[in-house]
Image: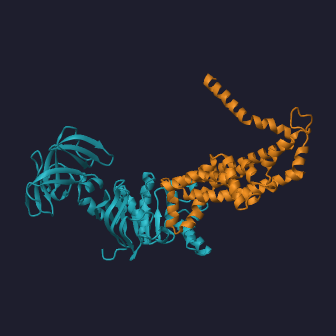
Amino acid sequence: MSLLRFSKLIFGSATVFFLIAPLIAILPLAFTDSVFLNYPIPAYSTRWFVELFTAGVWQRSIINSLIIGCGTTVLATLLGTVGAVGLRDKQLSLVLTTIKTIFLLPMVVPAVVLGVGMQLMFARYALTNTYLGVIIAHTVVAVPFVVVNVLAVLQGIDRRLEQAAASLGAAPVTVLQQVTLPLALPGIVSGAVFAFATSLDEVVLTLFVAGPNQRTLARQMFSTIRENISPAIAAAAFVFIVGTVLIAIVVNFSRGTKRAKEVR
Amino acid sequence: MNNPFIRLEEVSKSFGLLTVVEGLNLEIGKGEFISLLGPSGSGKTTILMMLAGFENPTSGAIWAGGNRIDSLPPHRRNMGVVFQNYALFPHMTVSQNVAFPLKMRSLPRAEVKERVGKALDMVQLGSLAERRPSQLSGGQQQRVALARALIFEPEVVLMDEPLGALDKQLREQMQLDIRDLHRRLKLTIVFVTHDQSEALTMSDRIAIFNRGKIEQIGKPSDIYDHPSTQFVAEFIGETNLVWGTVKSMEGGTARVGLPAGQQVFVETATDLGPNSSVCLSIRPERIKVGRREAAGNNITAAVSDIVYHGDHLRLIARSDGQSLIVKTDRSQPTLSIGDEVQLSFLSSDCWVVSP
């Protein structure tokens, strides 16, 4: 083995280790029998999972996360897809380029800044401490992921397919519904997954706009770690990671089979 | 044309500063097969796009069946379009693709099913109805695209280089198939191509485009035998262009002097003034090797190359400082490079083209 290949291997493994080391550190603690979140693990049990799914606050926070996550996914996917369809042209006018930039802005604006602004504005419209408020807040940061994903797919669609549909008698709305959107589906699905994941993991905005009734799983983990460092956090983290990995596998698999079909 | 079905009136199209089509007038009859032929960038595809409604003319009017259509959206024009890349919907099966235009017209399900079956049989694809387009070969995909464009019985079928992506054999088969469909279904077809032999094979009329304008329009044989300009003569088929000066003009026959002193007689309807310079087009297959007194024109040339083409030989001969291509059959007595040959052709085989 040449030195270059060897160093590539070492560097690659180091990078992978760097990325997943924190996960490896926390996951075993989910199965501890102890009441403390630290090593060594005296005995293994699933008591913290039981706690997670039975204790009132944890249960509530999981349900909240699902409600808010689903709400955000629907809203962000809808808005992001519509936005991407509008921003699709390759040669954008100055106005559209500006709008596109604004769409993507929440990706780079510090969440704290967004949070402060939202709290002030939501207070005015009585949206603080409401599910709708949290969903809107999460949607703001989730939309860019949908726009980017859908836009990427849309730009790969041959315009002539839509022209063909129009020439065959499809009105613009029908073209969108029968041709453009079905072809953009892979992008929409991955955009939706990103939106859901963004919402699930969002803490900063939630801290600003959510009340005690909209405590999400991430938010609950955040406060638990300050109040009483319970291994339930590790169990929650485990649920989080397994859920995310499952979604990623499903998305990858659906894309993979689609591609395989096309190749055949 | 007494009663044109499609009429383009002073149609122009510009993209920014670039004018692609300029003041175009064109009439297309019902049931006609017309080819728009020209090099890429000559504006032929833009005209098709304007007929289909994907582009709007910058100025001018387009009429179809007595109605002005140039501001009508594509889905209300009732024209079938066949694209070069087929543009089949990848997420639908073959039969769903073909059924699409009928579903858009909200026909009852039973009728859709029956007509889709018939249409697929027409293009011999009945057995592949449930396949996806990606599972078909290029030729099969093109036949699906044809079936889809014809199933709703459009008034006009627009074809944008539909055979460009197929290999030679398949292309020739499809040319005959399309021509056959045109005759059987009495279709009006506007066919865009840059392949001159395709246009000659298939069309009732050919319009030759150059730089956004029609250079010549007419029957294939007219255009081949009587090209009006140097561009057309060179674009359609192969030709020899010979430059000379008119010496005299007598009863429809001009005596043209070639630069190095030889003379040729040219039949022409136009009155050419003495001493005007002319460009002549002589098709390679019209020139015969060997002296023929009856031919009217006999010139001497030197063979500079001989190319074997299987069914014929091609001589490159130099005469009077100009290079001539001669297509000749293989029974010619063996010639070799450097030989002096006599070449003969009729005065009616010389055609005066404007530069």
Task: Classify the position of the N terminus of chain B by image quarter.
Answer: bottom left
| Count of numbered circles on the image | 0
Q: Position of residue A81 (x, y in %)?
A: 61, 57
- Answer whether residue B91 is visible to the viewer in this image: no
Colour cyan belongs to chain: B
Residue at position x 27%, y 53% in the image: B234
Q: Quadrant of residue B187?
A: bottom left
Q: Position of residue B98 (x, y in %)?
A: 55, 65
B149 or B116: nearer the viewer: B149
Task: Classify the position of the C terminus of chain B by image quarter.
Answer: bottom left
From the viewer's perspective, tell me whether residue A53 is left or right of residue A130: right
- Answer whether residue B289 is visible to the viewer in this image: yes
Q: Quadrant of residue B275?
A: bottom left
Q: Position of residue A62 (x, y in %)?
A: 81, 52
From the viewer's perspective, tell me whether residue B300 is left or right of residue B218: left
In the rendered image of the structure, the colour used to display chain A is orange
From the viewer's perspective, tell me whether residue B129 is left or right of residue B182: right
Residue at position x 87%, y 40% in the image: A31
B36 or A187: nearer the viewer: A187
Q: Position of residue A92 (x, y in %)?
A: 49, 54
B229 or B210: nearer the viewer: B210
Q: Indicate how the structure is coloured in the image.
A: by chain
B88 or A44: nearer the viewer: A44
